Image (tube, rainbow, N blue to C red):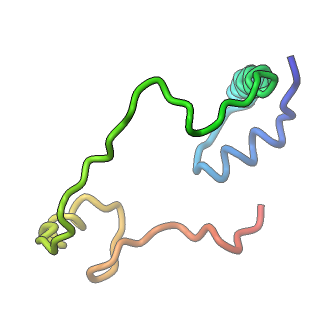
Amino acid sequence: MSLVDPSSVRRIAHLSRLRFTDEEVEEYGTELAKILDHVAVLETLPEVSGSERVACLATPERKDEVSQTGDAQQSLSNAPEHSGSYFRVPLVIGEES
């Protein structure tokens, strides 16, 4: 099993807006390593072209029509923060770790 270093787990947690204890960092690092090992096994399988399918799938279509999406104030009532008629979200771009 490959190892995922704790600093990588902490960085991923930070980007995901999660707070982990040291024990959780170790636990999730182990879980992430298992997932990455499984993906490595899948990468060894022969490539299947995109046109090979078990069944034909149809994409459902609907008319592209303008419709009322709901009351803005009702939507904003569930938001942790809002400013006027806009949702306020934490800054992510340009943030230093």
Front residue of 11/44: it is 44
Q: Which residue lies furthest to the bottom in this view?
A: 84
The quadrant in which the C terminus is found is: bottom right
Query: Left or right: 43 with respect to 81?
Result: right
Front residue of 82/16: it is 16
**Rendered residue at 73%/30% (across/down):** 47
Quarter where residue 56 is shown: top left
The quadrant in which the N terminus is found is: top right
**Rendered residue at 31%/62% (across/down):** 79
**Rendered residue at 66%/44% (across/down):** 13
Query: Left or right: 49 with respect to 59?
Result: right
Query: Measured along the vertical axis of the image, is residue 48 above or below residue 83?
Result: above
Q: Position of residue 61 (x, y in %)?
A: 24, 54
Query: Measured along the vertical axis of the image, is residue 95 above or below residue 20?
Result: below
Quarter where residue 83 is shown: bottom left
Q: Which residue lies furthest to the top in this view?
A: 1
Front residue of 71/60: it is 60
Quarter where residue 76 is shown: bottom left
Residue 23 seen in render: no
Residue 44 seen in render: yes
Front residue of 79/50: it is 50
**Rendered residue at 19%/58% (across/down):** 62
Q: Where is residue 18 in the image (x, y as percent from the top left)?
A: 59, 44
Q: Position of residue 26 (x, y in %)?
A: 76, 25
Q: How many numbered marks appear?
A: 0
Q: Position of residue 86 (x, y in %)?
A: 33, 78
